Image: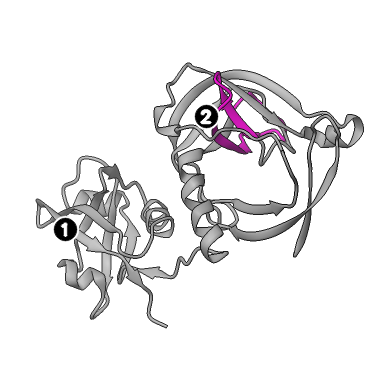
Amino acid sequence: AEEAVIKYAGINKEKYKAQLIGTDMVSDISLLKIDGKNLPYLKLGNSDDVIIGEWVIAMGNPFGLFEISDKPTVTVGVVSATGMNLNAEGGRYYRNMIQTDASINSGNSGGPLLNSLGEVIGVNAVIFSPNQGSIGLGFAIPINRVKGVLNELKKHGKIERNLWTGLEVQTVDARVARYFGLEQVEGVIVSDVKRNSPAQRAGFKVGDIILEVNGEKIMNDDTIIALVTEASEGTVLKMKVLREKRTMNLDLRLERGPS
């Protein structure tokens, strides 16, 4: 949509038309612009400083209640966990999420998660609802990740994610783990290395098993796809690799994909 409507729940309860500057499907973040003067605003905090157990406040518009009373809703809880990685959903990758037991329900998406100082530490995104209802587990996108996305959207209106590694990988299963003598079923095995690719320049060979990327354990191919998808051109992925029962470290620099 070229035009959206953002509702400001201040004293005058005015409505503003908003211009959509850009959207990033991968991070589930959009940037809107409105024309207004002397609008109140929230300070963006530092999500790297979030502590498990600290109080948080979730604001939003669950179930369309804003339409009825012109008032936002507020719920309170604590940070339950940090660094949570969720399964990819509809092309969106939810990584390093902040988990909270502050009640987040359908319609809260896009609202801020605040610390006790009133600083935005996250953007409410998804709930865990196996029975189509909230069970007290909500997740927010860390605001530090949001800041980076917003800067790119402000400059370019989009985020270029056409990056490639030149690797083809498959998740390690029990049979592969047994063959290579792995104690645990984890990592991905390299099934192909493209010629003149970042992977070839990094020194990868078919049969290598990637165990970690930037210190994060690789459990399956979705994990490494997510790491590449959310990175930017020129990012160096430091990979821990098992080759012929010896571990080694390889640095792979991401490049723009071939046209």
Residue 201: image quadrant is bottom left
Q: Is residue 1 above or below residue 73?
A: below
Magenta extent: 112-137
Q: Is residue 63 visible?
A: yes
Decide if residue 219 is on the left or right side of residue 41.
Answer: left
Q: Residue at x 20, y 72 (%)?
A: 200
Q: Secondary structure at mark 1?
A: strand
CB-based contact (under 8 Å), mark 1 and mark 2 = no
Residue 96: image quadrant is top left
Across and down, in percent, residue 49 comes to: 40, 27
Q: Residue at x 50, y 63 (%)?
A: 159
Q: Amino acid at mark 1?
A: Leu
**Which of the labelled discs sits on residue 250, or is there none?**
1
Q: Amino acid at mark 2?
A: Gln
Rendered-image quadrant of the C terminus: bottom left
**Which of the labelled discs sits on residue 99, or is there none?**
2
The front one of 193 and 231 is 231
Q: Is residue 56 above or below residue 95?
A: above
Q: Secondary structure at mark 2?
A: strand
Is 145 colored magenta in this rendering? no
Across and down, in percent, residue 140 comes to: 56, 36
Residue lying furthest front: 38
Q: Residue at x 20, y 68 (%)?
A: 206
Q: Residue at x 22, y 53 (%)?
A: 238
User: CA separation, marks 1 and 2?
Assistant: 33 Å
**Which of the labelled discs sits on residue 128, or is there none?**
none
Neighbour tally class for label 1: few under 14, some 14-19, many 20 plus, Cα within 10 Å: some
Residue 216: image quadrant is top left
